[in-house]
Image (cartoon, helix red, strand yellow):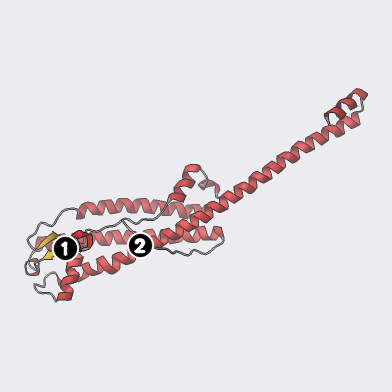
Amino acid sequence: MMKRAVEALERQDWAAVVIEFLMVVAGVLLAFQISEWASGRNDRRVRAESVERLLHESEQDVASLRELITEQKSSILANMNVTVANLRDPAPSPEVAEAMRAGIGASAVLPKPIAPDSVYRELIASGRFGEIGDVKMRDAVSNYASMMSYLDQAIDYARQGTSRPWETDSIHFAYDAKAPRKRRVEVDFRKLSADRPAQDQFFGRLGSQQFVVSNYDEALKAAEAMCREVARVAGKPCRPSGRTRAD
């Protein structure tokens, strides 16, 4: 092509020169357009894959929080509520006494949810999160991330209030390899029924549990909203599944 252009210039064949020039420009533009198209297709593929991975992570987050809340409410809070109702009973029935021991023993257990966030952190670190494009979805994801950060701080705050050991003659803890958390709760119910400091401390722990569980609930709402929005962008339903654990 360049040889023909030089020959056309030597002949002063301006029409041929113009044609050759236009062909060169058209070739460059076509190559640029093909490159742009390929780059755009790759970007769309990367965004689609990112949303797909984010949806899977969102489903795990919802499942993790639901599992934690169910366990906390049906086990720890349920036993603590039985304890509250019978704190002044010097001789509770064996079933009630067992629930009270479980409630007292777990009253300081304030687990943090193990909700994966590696995909979200990767998207933030790489700068691809802002390129996903859907503002409503990004807002839902960011709101969930903020809620989880607040939840982490709330649990740390509540743990400070429950970290003080029992200062009472009515409640003792003994090592037991077969018991949950490797310790057995020993309660003198007659003494506990008249032990106001121990009762007050228990009520404080109950308040901390209720405070944390209410924050679990708010985090779950944020996780469910995030999962719905990510699923909408992905064109798939949000189907939380899988079993996780809490620390």
Q: Image quadrant of residue 242?
A: bottom left
> Disc 2 or disc 1, which is closer to the eye?
1
Which numbered tag is attached to residue 217? 2
Mark 2, other Cα within 10 Å: few <14 / some 14–19 / many ≥20: some
Question: In the rendered structure, which amino acid carries the disc numbered 1?
Answer: Arg
Q: Is residue 59 visible?
A: yes
Q: What percent of the width, then of the height, locates residue 245?
A: 34, 59
As rendered, which of 200 and 183 lies closer to the eye? 183
Asked if disc 2 and disc 1 are in contact, CB closer than 8 Å, the reply is no
Label 2 and label 1: CA atoms lie apart by: 30 Å
Work out which quarter of the rendered image holds the C terminus and state it. bottom left
Q: What percent of the width, then of the height, locates residue 18?
A: 86, 32
The residue tagged with tag 1: helix, strand or loop? strand
Mark 1, other Cα within 10 Å: few <14 / some 14–19 / many ≥20: some
Q: What percent of the width, then of the height, locates residue 226?
A: 46, 58
The residue tagged with tag 2: helix, strand or loop? helix
Q: What percent of the width, then of the height, locates residue 71?
A: 31, 66
Q: Is residue 134 visible?
A: no
Q: Image quadrant of residue 11?
A: top right
Q: Measuring 42% from the left and 54% from the top, which residue is drawn there?
A: 144
Residue corresponding to mark 1: 184
As rendered, which of 246 and 145 lies closer to the eye? 246
Work out which quarter of the rendered image holds the N terminus and state it. top right
Is residue 134 shown left or right of residue 58? right
Q: Measuring 14% from the left and 55% from the top, which residue is drawn there?
A: 165
Which numbered tag is attached to residue 236? none
Which label's residue is closer to the chain start, 2 or 1? 1
As rendered, which of 75 and 183 lies closer to the eye? 183
